[in-house]
Amino acid sequence: MRSVSYPVEGYQTVGGPVRDVQNMGSCELHKTGDDLHRYGNGFYETGHGRLHIGCHLSSSGGYLQMGKTALSIGADTFQFFTRNPRGGKAKDIDPDDVASFLRLAQENDFVQIMAHAPYTLNPCAADRRVRAFALEVMSDDLARTEYTPGNFYNFHPGSHVGQGVAAGIELTADLLNRILRPEQTTTVLLETMSGKGSEIGGRFEELRQIIDRVELKEKIGVCFDTCHVYDAGYDIVNDLDGVLKEFDEVIGLERLRAVHINDSKNPFHSRKDRHARIGEGSLGIDTFANVINHPKLRRLPFYLETPNEPEGHAQEIRLLKELYRQR
Ligand code: FE
Ligand code: FE
Ligand code: ZN
């Protein structure tokens, strides 16, 4: 496995001075990183009194293409898979593509983008080779996400496949402790899951227990998936306040960094995980109006993972923007 280094020396948040990047490391991915970071000084923090929203996009055309598609559908962010769902080799990073994208993102006030790990990885598998593969892919992903510093990397905590929840939690935390680096600028997000099969992360307590075991806690956050939490038995339709209160007590709302905004094809507590378009599932449009306007959520970035083409996502984004109340 290639050793991972991070070109993050000169990382600055937007608004700060741009410094040169030193210590580029030996990873061949980072050969021309200096140019990248002239533009790569981070993304805007959210909270500008507007709805921050995007959707999952195909990464096959590269970063600039995703940025342009996002703009064309009214988005100021997006999510993408780092590689194909099977976890195969990722495409080489094209430094010019990244630089062009970072320029576009700054010019258009993008907020944090989200890379999503291949969903077939299992960080807490019983089979050691399956875990080693998850570790290899995720560390490589974290090297790659440093080309676009200061953003999110979201993953599924995994399935314990009969080892028991406690063993799964240990293994996933152990993997995180091996891949997180003090110098990384990417925040790694644990996704709330529906609890289907032997999935870890269907209960807030399970995410909390993983976080408790992670050494570099400042690199960790949580992504709240509306379809998953509802399928898992958190009633955000009738008691969003209560669910967020529970999240706060168990995990802490300061860890909540992003929302996957999806309707669900299945009823409450079904533990199924099938996404529906906004307003077309069991959550319903009123729930989404509540979610995007909730004082604890309204500044977060929202990412649609609904079954739609870009045109359909553009419609959903328009709809949600209409529902967003100015304060
Ligand atoms: Fe996911
Ligand atoms: Fe999700
Ligand atoms: Zn899902």
Image (cartoon, grey):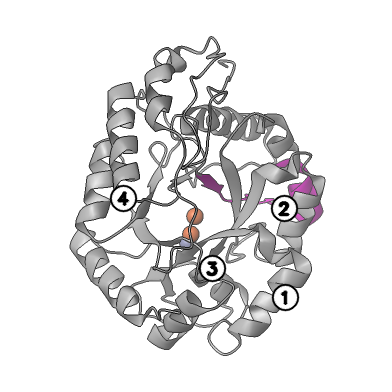
Rounded to the nearest angstrom, the CA distance separating label 4 from label 2 is 34 Å
Residue 215, image x, y percentages = 79, 39
Disc 4 and disc 2 in contact, CB within 8 angstroms: no
Please tell me which of labels 1 and 2 falls first in the chain: 2
- Which residue extends farthest top? 26
Q: What label sits on residue 246 in the rendered view?
A: 1
Residue 72 appears left or right of 148: left
268 relative to 300, above or below: below
**Crowdedness near tag 4: few (<14), some (14–19) or many (≥20) residues, C-alpha within 10 Å:** many
Residue 34, image x, y percentages = 42, 18
Rounded to the nearest angstrom, the CA distance separating label 1 from label 3 is 16 Å
Identify residue type, mark 4: Leu
Find disc 4 in the rendering and name its residue.
Answer: 57
Please tell me which of labels 4 and 2 falls first in the chain: 4
Which sits in the foreground, 281 or 295? Answer: 295
Identify residue type, mark 2: Gly
Find disc 2 in the rendering and name its residue.
Answer: 162
Rounded to the nearest angstrom, the CA distance separating label 3 from label 2 is 21 Å
SS label for mark 1: helix
Q: What label sits on residue 228 in the rendered view?
A: 3
Residue 18 appears left or right of 84: right
Say which of marks 3 and 4 sits in front.
Answer: 4
Determine if residue 26 is in view. Answer: yes
SS label for mark 3: helix
Q: Does the residue labelled 3 lie within 8 Å of ligand 3?
A: yes
Rounded to the nearest angstrom, the CA distance separating label 3 from label 4 is 20 Å
